[in-house]
Image (cartoon, rainbow, N blue to C red):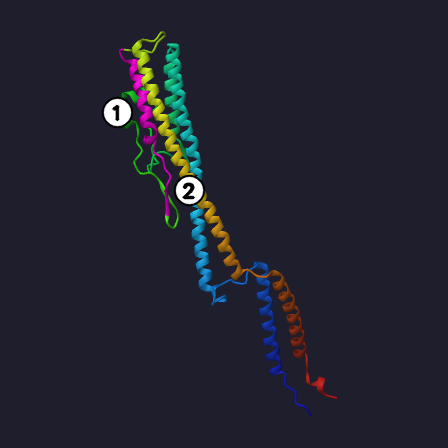
């Protein structure tokens, strides 16, 4: 009579069923995640390369993000600098027109309007922080609200509360860009001209009138020349701002290209071939079904199945 023992067969088939289930799980996870690497231990021979690529990608993304923020700020500053320079040029034209017509009765209104426009720009806030205060962003960089307040100060420099530290940012391993502009750099020269005109108007040779006196004509000609120089200086600052904008833009493009390369390196290591993964999943499911059926059959066998 043949001796029957199912213990060894049970163990073997159970082990095979567990192996098939494990293969099915791995295939399902690969299809669901699109990744073949979930831990560095999955690719011990490439773990160093993968870790270095991920770190480089994270660092590059951080640089690109900072460069993007810097570009946005420089773009805002470009609009502001252009506006301040335009105010200087517009006021210069108003002075020249007054000289040509020898009529300055409405000139002080234009001067006060120019002060308010420039003061408003220099006290611009973004996300609750003053843009032109240097690294001191909690107080308005221009502390005078009116042209009269400016006249009352001991010196024009006293109108500014910004510090002298211009914000800067690192946008690459070896590149730091100073992108901040100070209110005092933009406004000191222009405020000095506005104050000089206001002081003249309220002094012994004022107010500006129609017809104008020789002293008034001479003063307006002098300040028109000064305004031309102030506008040129503002345009130079704006040109430098434009150069920094281009540097930030170039850094963004460079980092985007680097990230495309690094993502390719990472993908080559950890991304799954979905077609192959689906095929393995189908095979694993068939194997699980077959192993389960075989195990069930063995479990249901009795000695009677071998007796004639």
Q: In which quarter of the image is residue 211?
A: top left
Residue stretch in magenta = 175-204
The crowding category of the residue bearing disc 1, from other C-alpha atoms within 10 Å (few below 14, some 14 to 19, many at least 20), is: few
Give the structural element (helix, strand or loop) at label 1: loop
Q: Which residue carries the number 2 mark?
A: 247
**Image coords of residue 244 (percent x, y):** 40, 39
Whether residue 194 appears in magenta in the rendering, the answer is yes
Query: How far apart are the two marked residues, 2 and 1, measured between alpha carbons?
Result: 37 Å
Q: Is residue 112 left or right of residue 256?
A: left
**Image coords of residue 218 (percent x, y):** 31, 14
Between disc 2 and disc 1, the foreground one is 2
Say above or below: 283 vs 7. above
Q: Nearer the viewer, residue 12 or 52?
A: 52
Query: Can you tell which mark lies on residue 155?
Result: 1
Identified at 42% across, 48% down, the residue is 63
Residue 209 visible? The answer is yes
Q: Main secondary structure of the magenta part?
A: helix
Q: In which quarter of the image is residue 162?
A: top left
Q: Which of marks 2 and 1 is nearer the N terminus?
A: 1
* Quadrant including the N terminus: bottom right
Whether residue 133 appears in magenta in the rendering, the answer is no
Mark 2 touches mark 1? (CB < 8 Å): no
Say above or below: 119 vs 249. above
Say above or below: 152 vs 60. above
Q: Residue furthest top?
A: 211
* Quadrant including the C terminus: bottom right
**Image coords of residue 177 (percent x, y):** 37, 42
């Amino acid at each position: 009579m043949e001796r029957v023992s199912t213990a060894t067969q049970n163990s073997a088939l159970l082990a095979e069923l567990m192996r098939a289930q494990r293969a099915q799980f791995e295939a399902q996870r690969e299809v669901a995640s699109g990744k073949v690497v979930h831990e560095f231990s999955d690719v011990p021979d490439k773990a160093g390369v993968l870790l270095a690529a991920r770190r480089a990608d994270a660092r590059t993304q951080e640089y690109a993000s900072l460069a993007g923020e810097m570009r946005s700020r420089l773009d805002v500053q470009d609009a502001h600098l252009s506006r301040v320079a335009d105010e200087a040029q517009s006021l210069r034209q108003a002075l020249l027109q007054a000289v040509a017509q020898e009529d300055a009765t409405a000139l002080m209104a234009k001067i006060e309007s120019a002060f308010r426009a420039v003061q408003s720009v220099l006290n611009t806030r973004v996300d609750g922080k003053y843009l032109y205060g240097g690294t001191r962003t909690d107080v308005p960089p221009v502390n005078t609200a009116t042209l009269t307040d400016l006249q009352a100060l001991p010196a024009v420099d006293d109108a500014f509360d910004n510090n002298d530290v211009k914000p800067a940012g690192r946008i690459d391993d070896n590149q730091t860009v100073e992108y901040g502009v100070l209110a005092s750099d933009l406004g000191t020269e222009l405020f000095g001209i506005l104050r000089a005109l206001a002081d003249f108007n309220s002094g012994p040779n004022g107010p500006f009138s129609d017809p104008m006196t020789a002293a008034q004509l001479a003063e307006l000609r002098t300040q028109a020349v000064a305004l031309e120089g102030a506008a040129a200086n503002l345009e130079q600052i704006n040109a430098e701002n434009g150069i920094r904008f281009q540097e930030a833009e170039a850094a963004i493009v460079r980092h985007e290209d680097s990230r495309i390369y690094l993502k390719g390196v990472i993908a080559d290591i950890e991304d799954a071939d979905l077609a192959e993964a689906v095929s393995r999943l189908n095979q694993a499911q068939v194997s699980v079904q077959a192993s389960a059926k075989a195990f069930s059959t063995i479990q249901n066998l009795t000695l009677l199945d071998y007796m004639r």
